[in-house]
Image (spheres, rainbow, N blue to C red):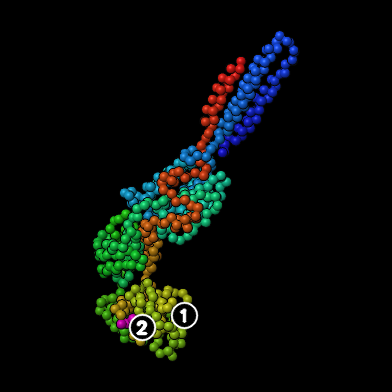
Amino acid sequence: MSFLHPLALLGLGAAAIPALLHLLQRRTPPELEFPPLRYLSEAERQSARRLKLRHLLLLLLRTALIVVIVLAAARPLVPVSGGGEHQPTALVVILDNSPSSGAVVDGRPVLDRLRVAARASIARTSLADRVWLLLADGVVRGGGREGLLASADSATPDWRRLDLAQAVERAARLVYAEPLPEREVHVFSDLQRTALATGRADVPPGVRILALTPARERATNRGIARARVAEGAVVVEVTGSGGDEPAPVTVRIGIREVGRSLAKPGQGAAVSVALPPQRTGWWTGEAILEPDELRADDRRPFVWHVAPPARVASGSGAGPFVEAALSVLRDAGRVGEGHDVIVGDVPTAGGGTGHWVVQPPADPALLGQANRALAARGVPWRWGSAGTPGPLVTREVEAIAGAQVTRRYRLEGTGGDVVATVNGDPWLVRAGEVVLLGSRLDTAWTALPGTPGFVPFVDALVNRIVVGVAAVGMAEGPPHVEFRVQGVDTVGATVFGLDPRESDLTPATPDLVAAAFGPTALLLNDARFAAERFAGTRRADASAILLVLAVLLAATELGVATLTR
């Protein structure tokens, strides 16, 4: 039991007043033996015993009355299992309004249910509590109850993803630092499995973690995880939860539909939709899924740059396969005549204005001369010792991924961009105006010239890789495209989109929640959450009951006192 006004208990000292008055009023009358009145003595003794009992009862009633009045003035709080007030509590309410909260489950958005529950927790706080609200943007909002209620009511699905384990740990440490009797963290989230798969919250002792259970129905959802342009086509990756049926994907450039395909959701699964030829410049498009339970991930933009055909010349040692590929590209209008790019095996010493695609010399005896020529041009890479055979690994030029390399030199150096590797060693490196290959483009060195992807590879090599294609980056944010400009030239772009993990609406299991929030965390449905919030500190004011008891005691005392007269 606790008291709202404990200083009032000092008044309990007044309970001794009736006893003192009773003792002061006691008189011992003189005794005189008078035979005629001897028969009255017995009656007097019987009457005295009755009076003593009544006086003792009055003493007890008056003492109890004073005690009850003093206790009522102190306003005692007693533990209750239902409603009632609670002790001062430090509370952080986590309202997860990340993109997945916009999913529709049981006919209404998940965020609607979370907002109602969060509002109920904030509304139960008092002026003696310290309360904060944490949303997906990571901002901890403090202030009065009305202001926090308004913030919770106005919360809409955000584009940011909330790290729940990190948020719970942050909130737990915040309330732990407060000098209040009780500390709680209330978590209102859809509790995605992907949001709890990594990370563990370090919760200080004495902090209660209460989490609302997710909806029982598992929502089926498809979302576009990524869309990027490579080799004249847009590659679309689809992810999601609740089934493995293929999802129809539509690709648009502006308002014009340029292609459709079916994509099966899953990590690493993707479909390629060919893009029509476009004139030189920057182009944007959009990959679109049919609307489903979560609309925020059904669209994702992409961007690519169309450069004018490179003017390419064959240098010494280019090789017949390169010559044949360049001839095909010239006939198709993909390259022109000129010396913007030179493909050979020994770059010209000195500065020069052209770009070079350099293969190792066929004769190992010329390797040292070639390395010196690279150094004279300022290239920080060189050919080293012979490397082991293996497949090509690259994400920038998918046409050659997996092609077998049987003979190669290890590329040694620093800086630049590593475009492709073999067994973890650099095989294709871009350093300034020079692209260095670890193998000759010949069937004696690699199976690449005999594959269908060889001509597209040479196309990418002379048109995109060697000139350093304008970078297209990816970032998390509301789906849109931002261009980077230097002067009047557009030099790159960034494509913004939602975190692909938000598309997986599979809820976490209770074991996963316990592992992420700690074994003492409580996972509760709506009814149990309402009963458990502030349960460790919930008290009811018993002063009203004590006042009623005081009235009954006063009435009883009055009745007994009247009978004694």
Label 2 or label 1, whichever comes before in sequence order: 1
* SS majority, magenta: helix
Tell me, yes or no, whether the highlighted magenta stretch contains residue 534: no
> Residue at 30% of width from left, 82% of height from top?
450
Q: Can you see residue 30?
A: yes
> Residue at 34% of width from left, 82% of height from top?
447
The amino acid marked with disc number 2 is Thr
CA distance for labels 2 and 1: 20 Å
Return the residue at label 2: 446
Q: Residues within 10 Å of mark 2 (few under 14, many from 20)?
A: many
Instruction: Judge by depth and name the residue closer to the eye, 468 or 525.
Output: 525
Instruction: Judge by depth and name the residue closer to the eye, 557 or 510.
Output: 557
Do the numbered discs 2 and 1 sit on residues whose CB atoms are within 8 Å? no
> Residue at 70% of width from left, 10% of height from top?
37
Return the residue at label 1: 412
> Residue at 53% of width from left, 42% of height from top?
88
Q: Quadrant of residue 279?
A: bottom left
**Range of residues picked out in magenta:** 446-450
Asked if residue 152 lies left or right of residue 236, the reply is right
For the C terminus, the quadrant is: top right
**x and y percentages locating residue 186 in the rendered image:** 46, 48
Q: Can you see residue 95?
A: no
Asked if residue 541 lies left or right of residue 473, the reply is right
**x and y percentages locating residue 460 in the rendered image:** 33, 75
Q: Residues within 10 Å of mark 1 (few under 14, many from 20)?
A: some
**x and y percentages locating residue 198 in the rendered image:** 45, 61
Of badges 2 and 1, nearer the viewer stands 2
Asked if residue 418 lies left or right of residue 219, the reply is right
The amino acid marked with disc number 1 is Glu
